[in-house]
Amino acid sequence: MSKKDKTMRSPRNISMRLGWGCSKDVWLNMLKKETRYVHDKHFEVLHSDLEPQMRSILLDWLLEEIYAPKLQEFAYVTDGACSEEDILRMELIILKALKWELCPVTIISWLNLFLQVDALKDAPKVLLPQYSQEKFIQIAQLLDLCILAVDSLEFQYRILAAAALCHFTSVEVVKKASGLEWDNISECVDWMVPFVSVVKSTSPVKLKIFKKISMEDRHNIQTHTNYLAMLDEVNYVKTLRKGGQLSPVCNGGIMTPPKSTEKPPGKH
């Protein structure tokens, strides 16, 4: 079996009946979308004005957006440069260019599926979350941070989600939940080490209670923290890794940076 075949095979538990569709068809459709929406790590060749740091800032703004601005608000901030009709016409042009393919399987969708498959028992109810909400938001925070880095585009969302899950669980759990072997995720797991180090060195995100959100759905309300500052710390950790200044810890082999008081002069 080739490496590609291994990454395409269905995890064992996905073969269980979902109750709302053919599990094999659902899985294959998700994989098909994964290959259709291809990441391009060389996007800056086509968009030379968009530097990696600006990409990180724009994505961070998107994560922080509380609600999508209304059409009239977009037109208003252009100060007369574009009318609502102009924006709608351009939107239609863009949609046609994209062939209306606007529904990729997101990185959080993969995480949700993997955690759910791992938590499934003999009587699966895939539509209802059975996993730890606390674990979900911790891993989701890690993934939110990872995608701010331009080199995350080297990996498919499925691989990123599986690697993040591996850092919080084990290779065995990932294999069961995703069908992926260690060879498929090892490179991404290693790439993710600085991000994990920074996330685990900060205060863990907490589940919040919302008046209009049910308790079983509250983990889906995306939390936001100072990701740009965390990304700066990630870059510093990467520098330490290259210089061999990281100290190992016992938690899953994750490497951690020295305390701020132990940093070399000029690095504070």
Image: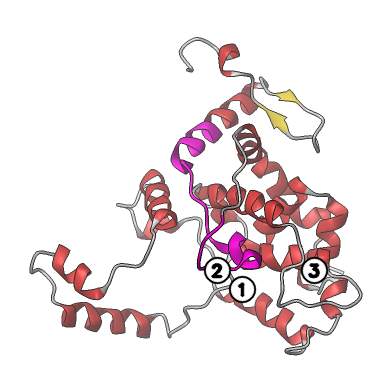
Residue mark closest to the camera, 3 vs 2: 3
Q: Which residue is mark 1?
A: 35
Does residue 163 sit above or below 26 in this rendering?
above
**Residue closest to the far top:** 265
Q: Secondary structure at mark 3?
A: helix
Mark earlier in primary sequence (3, 1): 1
**Residue closest to the far left:** 80
Q: Amino acid at mark 2?
A: Val
Residue mark closest to the camera, 3 vs 1: 3
Per the model, the C-alpha gap separating discs 3 and 2 is 25 Å
* Of residues 56 and 214, the one drawn nearer to the viewer in this rendering: 214
Q: Which mark is residue 117?
A: 3
Q: Amino acid at mark 1?
A: Thr
Q: Which residue is mark 2?
A: 38
Q: Secondary structure at mark 2?
A: loop
Question: Residue 194 in the image: x percent, y percent?
Answer: 63, 36
Number of marks: 3
